[in-house]
Amino acid sequence: MSINQIFPFISTALMLGFTIYVLQRFFVRRAPNFLFWGIGLAMFGAGSFAEAYLSLAWNRWIFFVWYLFGAALNAAWIGHGTLYLLVRKPWVHGVTVLLVLGSLFAGTLMLNAMPKLDAGAFTISKPVSEQYGTKVLEAGQTLPTGAQTTTTTYRGQQVTVVRGLLPLGSPVRLTTPFFNIYGLLTLVGGAIYSAFLFWRKRVLPNRVIGNVLIAAGALLIGSASTLTRLGYGQFLYLAELLSAILMFAGFRYAARPQPTDAPQSVAVAAD
Amino acid sequence: MPNPTRANDGSHIPEKSMFFEKFIPALLILMGVLMVALIVFAAGVLLGIIHF
């Protein structure tokens, strides 16, 4: 086992500790932001574990967990926790309903895709993020190293494809960008906005730094995932670990007890 | 008159701090730009402009 294969296991352990820490706060305070953060972090941890497992062996249900929780849903659920923290309006409950229904819909689509998985395309020699999707090989396009091709009919046309685990045109793949855009806006945008709010008011430097660390951690894994899917996957596991460390450190730092003269109207925004 | 204890009690951003005056705002802008770039990329995938 290489050091690169050990990183996801460390990330999983770290995310488990992070999840327990956040859920404990939910059970004490009963604030919905902690619940959504906890669920999202549990999804992140499950995705990390699945990725670690799939670097050693194939299992279709572990792939189900990796795609649904690790690739599609986790950022949106963590980000939704941030929305609950920043926006105390009734319409946020409506967004919660949409998020839950959307997640169930994505789960159903993923279940429908399960019998069609091309397990023969799987290899432990590269991250699952680099091999989950079947792609059409355009004319003149260079074949990626080690890629397997086959010919198939797609939308009435014969096309050559680079084999991937999910079949070409799987509807579940269309749901992922929606969740990731929402997750980026709420998780990263929310952390940047919170940091800016405290910075502008010149108060609570620990929350400025804590939110910067959370945003940096989320952007790091978002960027590394994007690069991986473009074929540059060598830093993914390290980036995932650093992301988990940055977000956990940011959360702990932002949650440190405040001096008594801290303005409460601002303090509540990142509580 | 500024309260001499305020800057050191941890509740306020220290005055004339290079870290908070320059580094943090630059980092926030940089992260905002990166976030928008990732959102545009994801939207491109969704719209079929970027084949992924």
Image (cartoon, coloured by chain):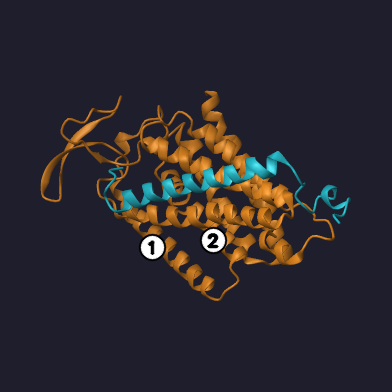
Chain colours: A orange, B cyan
Q: Nearer the viewer, residue A33 or A4?
A: A33
Q: Nearer the viewer, residue A207 or A240?
A: A207
Residue A232, picture quadrant = top left
C-alpha gap between disc 2 and disc 1: 17 Å
Pointer 2 chain: A
Query: x%, y% of residue A99?
Result: 46, 64
Relative to A199, is A51 on the left or the right?
A: left
- The answer to whether A205 is drawn above or below residue A162 in the figure is below
Q: Quadrant of the C terminus of chain A?
A: bottom right
Density class for disc 2 (Cα within 10 Å; few <14, some 14-19, many ≥20) is many
Whether residue B42 is visible to the viewer of this picture, yes or no, is yes
Whether residue A17 is visible to the viewer of this picture, yes or no, is no
- Secondary structure of residue under mark 1: helix
Q: Which residue is mark 2?
A: A80
Q: Nearer the viewer, residue A42 or A199?
A: A199
Pointer 1 chain: A
Relative to B39, is A13 on the left or the right?
A: right
- The answer to whether A7 is drawn above or below residue A267 in the figure is above
Q: Nearer the viewer, mark 2 or mark 1?
A: 2
Mark carried by residue A105: 1
Density class for disc 1 (Cα within 10 Å; few <14, some 14-19, many ≥20) is some
Residue at the image point whose x is 48% and y is 48% from the top: B35
Query: x%, y% of residue B19?
Result: 69, 40
- Secondary structure of residue under mark 2: helix
Query: x%, y% of residue A37?
Result: 60, 56
Relative to A173, is B8 on the left or the right?
A: right
Residue A246, picture quadrant = top right
Question: What's the amino acid at mark 2?
Answer: His
Query: x%, y% of residue A34?
Result: 64, 60
